[in-house]
Amino acid sequence: MENRIVLFSNIKGGVGKTTLCALFASYLAENGIPVIAIDADLQASLYRHRQREQDVAVGVQAPWNVDLLDTTDSKQLKKVMTQLKKVPGVVLIDCPGNLNDRNLEYIYKSADTAVIPISFDPDTVDATGIFIKALKSISEAQLVFMPNRIITSERKSEELRQRAQTTELLGLVGTVTPTIKQSVTVKRYTTLYPLEKAQLDIVKPAFNKIMEIIK
Ligand SMILES: Nc1ncnc2c1ncn2[C@@H]1O[C@H](COP(=O)(O)OP(=O)(O)OP(=O)(O)O)[C@@H](O)[C@H]1O
Ligand SMILES: [Mg+2]
């Protein structure tokens, strides 16, 4: 497969970048697509998650690799991004939220697709708007919005109206995937084992949409 650089990014924290990046990596691997994950976040959540799992699952073969990416050294970062562009298959990058770091431009510029997890609360919608503007000024990446942690119980009509309006607006600048609901099944992700049936049921429509886009 051709190289594809796919970011999981949003200036807003806690929207599900790391969780969805890990689940999508497993999903691609299970579908026979070569994939590596790059943890570019200083928190190194994805990398540490994998390490914790491997500490207790000694000898278990990981379905995909996770590498840390140091974003502080601009020369080195530029070099690594050039190398990542040559990797056959999909390179998923779990990005930091921070937009002030000029070095991150190297990552944004080399991206083919940016998956942007969102929720529909006004704070996240506003922050995402700021992020889109900044991203579009430096990158030609296709934007894919992924509504995540969506509570499926009955909503007030005003809230539903706002959701529809936000979805419509985001649809003008990118693709909006089917929603991923708030669920402990999604929260309890693993980076070593296949997705559980219950996880698949929740993420499959959204993940198939990204697959279609990056094909
Ligand atoms: N669909 C979901 N259902 C339930 N919990 C979720 C879901 N997606 C993410 N979470 C939880 O939300 C929290 C934030 O998720 P995550 O760490 O993936 O977000 P993030 O955008 O990477 O955060 P950060 O900005 O800190 O890097 C975590 O506790 C995670 O377990
Ligand atoms: Mg994260």
Image: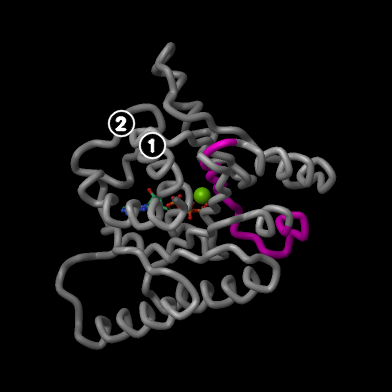
Q: Place residue 102 in its image quadrant.
A: bottom right
Q: Is residue 120 left or right of residue 96?
A: left
Q: Which residues are magenta?
A: 88-105
Residue type at mark 2 is: Pro
Identify the residue shown where x is 20% and y is 82%. Answer: 156
User: Which residue does the numbered mark 2 point to in the structure image?
Assistant: 194
Q: For mark 1, give the secondary structure.
A: helix
The label number, if any, that marks residue 128 in the structure image: none
Q: In the image, residue 28 lies at what x, y percent?
A: 39, 39
Identify the residue shown where x is 38% and y is 42%. Answer: 23
Q: Is residue 28 above or below residue 163?
A: above
Mark sitting earlier along the chain (1/2): 1
State yes or no: discs 1 and 2 in contact (Cβ < 8 Å): yes
Identify the residue shown where x is 61% and y is 55%. Answer: 111
Q: Is residue 150 above or below residue 110?
A: below
Q: Is mark 1 within 8 Å of ligand 1?
A: no
Q: In the image, residue 29 lies at what x, y percent?
A: 40, 34
User: Which residue does the numbered mark 1 point to in the structure image?
Assistant: 26
